[in-house]
């Protein structure tokens, strides 16, 4: 469950007309903070980002699921489910047993995914995958 402060910051971004990815960034930031605090870990930086995006979608951020071919079909379907859940209004209470199982699994993971070098490597690899439209070729 995201913290109220994070939801408040995301809503403020929405009021200012910022992009859904910017709004979702607040949830990713919260996730990285949780890992650094030691609340839980993550197997990789990608997983930490994915958890943050999932929380954002479930909190109602209008962040559409990734297109076909960008991620695995399992990930895309889960993102679709999260998005649909966030767009519905009444939120059901999460199943405590499943919630506990997820928490225990994440607690067993390492904390290195939120380190500076790991985040820098993730940002660099993500930038490498983007197009070079901004570059001028000579």
Image: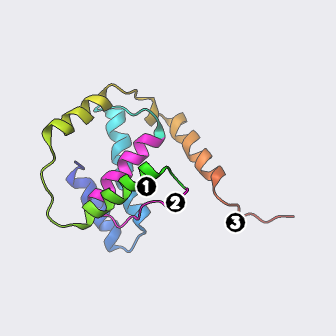
- Mark 2 vs 3: CB contact within 8 A: no
Residue at point 44%, 36% (across, down): 114
Q: Secondary structure at mark 1?
A: helix
Q: Secondary structure at mark 2?
A: loop
Q: Would you call the spot at circle 1 few (<14 residues within 10 Å), some (14-19), or many (20 or more)?
A: some
In this rendering, is residue 25 above or below 99? below
Q: Would you call the spot at circle 2 few (<14 residues within 10 Å), some (14-19), or many (20 or more)?
A: few
Please tell me whether mark 2 or mark 3 is closer to you in this view.
2
Query: Which quadrant does the C terminus fall into?
Result: bottom right
Residue at point 32%, 64% (across, down): 61
In this rendering, is residue 61 above or below 111? below
User: Residue 40, percent across and down?
Assistant: 31, 32
Foreground residue among 135 and 80 = 80
- Mark 1 vs 2: CB contact within 8 A: yes
Q: Which residue is mark 2?
A: 68
Outermost residue, right direction?
138
Label disc, if present, on residue 5 of the rendered structure: none
Asked if the stretch drawn in magenta spans residue 68, the answer is: yes
Label disc, if present, on residue 76 of the rendered structure: 1
Label disc, if present, on residue 134 of the rendered structure: 3
């Amino acid at each position: 469950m995201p913290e109220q402060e994070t939801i408040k910051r995301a809503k403020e971004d929405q009021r200012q007309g910022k992009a859904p990815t910017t709004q979702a960034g607040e949830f990713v930031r919260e996730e990285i903070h949780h890992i650094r605090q030691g609340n839980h870990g993550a197997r990789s930086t990608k997983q930490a980002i994915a958890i943050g995006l999932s929380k954002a979608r479930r909190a109602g951020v209008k962040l559409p699921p990734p297109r076909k071919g960008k991620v695995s079909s399992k990930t895309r379907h889960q993102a679709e489910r999260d998005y649909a859940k966030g767009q519905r209004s009444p939120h059901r209470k999460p199943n405590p047993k499943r919630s506990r199982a997820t928490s225990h699994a994440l607690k067993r993971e390492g904390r290195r995914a939120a380190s500076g070098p790991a985040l820098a490597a993730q940002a660099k690899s993500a930038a490498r995958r983007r197009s070079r439209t901004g570059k001028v070729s000579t």
